[in-house]
Image (cartoon, rainbow, N blue to C red):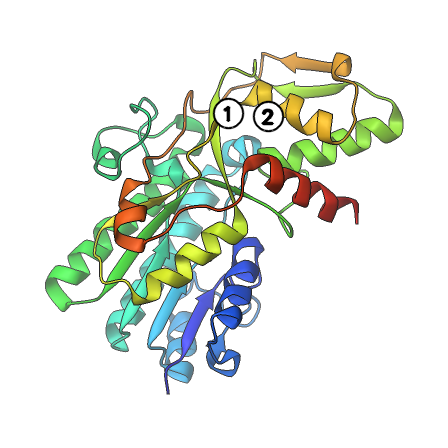
Amino acid sequence: MNKIIVTGGHGFLGKAVCKRLEMCGYDMNHVVVPRSKEYDLTKQSQCEKLFSKHNPSTVIHLAATCGGIGANRQNPGVYFYNNMSMGINVIENCRKYNTNKIILVGTVCSYPKYCQTPFKEDDIWLGYPEETNAPYGIAKKSLYVMLDAYRQQYGLNSLVLIPTNLYGPNDNFDDNSSHVIPALIKKIHKCKLNNEKLTVWGDGSATREFLYVEDAARAIVQGIDVDSSNIINLGSGEEISILDLVYTICNIMKFDTSMIEWDTSKPNGQPKRMLDISRARQELKWQNQTTLMDGLSKTIEWYNA
């Protein structure tokens, strides 16, 4: 019986991946989505309990402790420890239980702070990540090395996918840990209701690339049948400045843009962030299908509902 474990399957990306698995005809009775209260993956004994019970043929490791710039600055130790220990425990149990394949979803935060855009997968080793999210980025980056070592020594079959910033329905809208798009949508909604000014961190000059969550889920599920040991970027090919992003969301939500103020005492984060996705096209036969405008409209519609 082929079982798939999806760690973090109840989360934002995890829900989209499980929905995609079902759409692709996978038997959902054989898809295991563990809850953290039942299996704390930061503890080796609990991770082993999960594997010994289900003995999966495939593992999609999505579970992560992550957030925006503010959350990264407040919790560097927690972010490093949780992501590192979960990843180490999951990979080691894949080895022990002879899992056929593990797909690890990494992070764009692994790339060096100053990296020529678009980021190519081999550039990931060329420098230190942007300081505010380095603990998270380096924890994930270390797991890429672990997977490579386990492939060499034990023949563990793995694939690392690095999505750019994700967004979409079911995103995390928590004030303390949300990323830029959900944070902006929630702030703008509140400012509209209370007729308040919208304060945005930084000066708006940083650029980002965003990928709609359903496009990322499609790539992850396609990855199950792809024989590649490479790190593969997942991106949209659309770069946008934070300033333009803020104005775009304000326009969709019909918020008066004269009410925007920029708090330049706060950090911008990484100066530029955009991925080279030619490897995804070649090896996964994948590219995104949702434009930023369409994706933002769908996300805002979901949030309002």
Residue 288 percent coordinates (x, y) = 45, 46
Tell me, yes or no, if residue 34 can be seen here: no
Compared to residue 184, the image places residue 47 above or below, namely below
Q: Earlier in the sequence, mark 2 or mark 1?
A: 1
Residue 84 percent coordinates (x, y) = 36, 51
Residue depicted at x 40% and y 47%: 287
Compared to residue 232, the image places residue 151 above or below, namely below
Amino acid found under the numbered disc labelled 1:
Ile
Residue annotated with mark 1: 240
Residue depicted at x 31% and y 29%: 112
Evaluate if marks 2 and 1 touch, with contact meaning CB atoms under 8 Å apart: yes
Quarter of image, res 139: top left
Residue 85 percent coordinates (x, y) = 37, 56
* The N terminus, quarter of image: bottom left
**Front residue of 207 and 196:** 207
**Front residue of 17 and 238:** 238
Extreme residue in the right direction? 194
**Circle on res. 209:** none
Residue annotated with mark 2: 245
Compared to residue 106, the image places residue 69 above or below, namely above
Tell me, yes or no, if residue 31 can be seen here: yes
| Disc 2/disc 1 C-alpha distance (Å) | 6 Å
Residue 152 percent coordinates (x, y) = 11, 60
Give the crowd class for mark 1: few <14, some 14-19, many >=20 residues within 10 Å. Answer: some
Question: Callout 1: helix, strand or loop?
Answer: strand
Quarter of image, res 35: bottom right
In the picture, measured across the screen, residue 184 lies left or right of residue 281, that is right
**Front residue of 65 and 42:** 65
Give the crowd class for mark 2: few <14, some 14-19, many >=20 residues within 10 Å. Answer: many
Q: How many marks?
A: 2
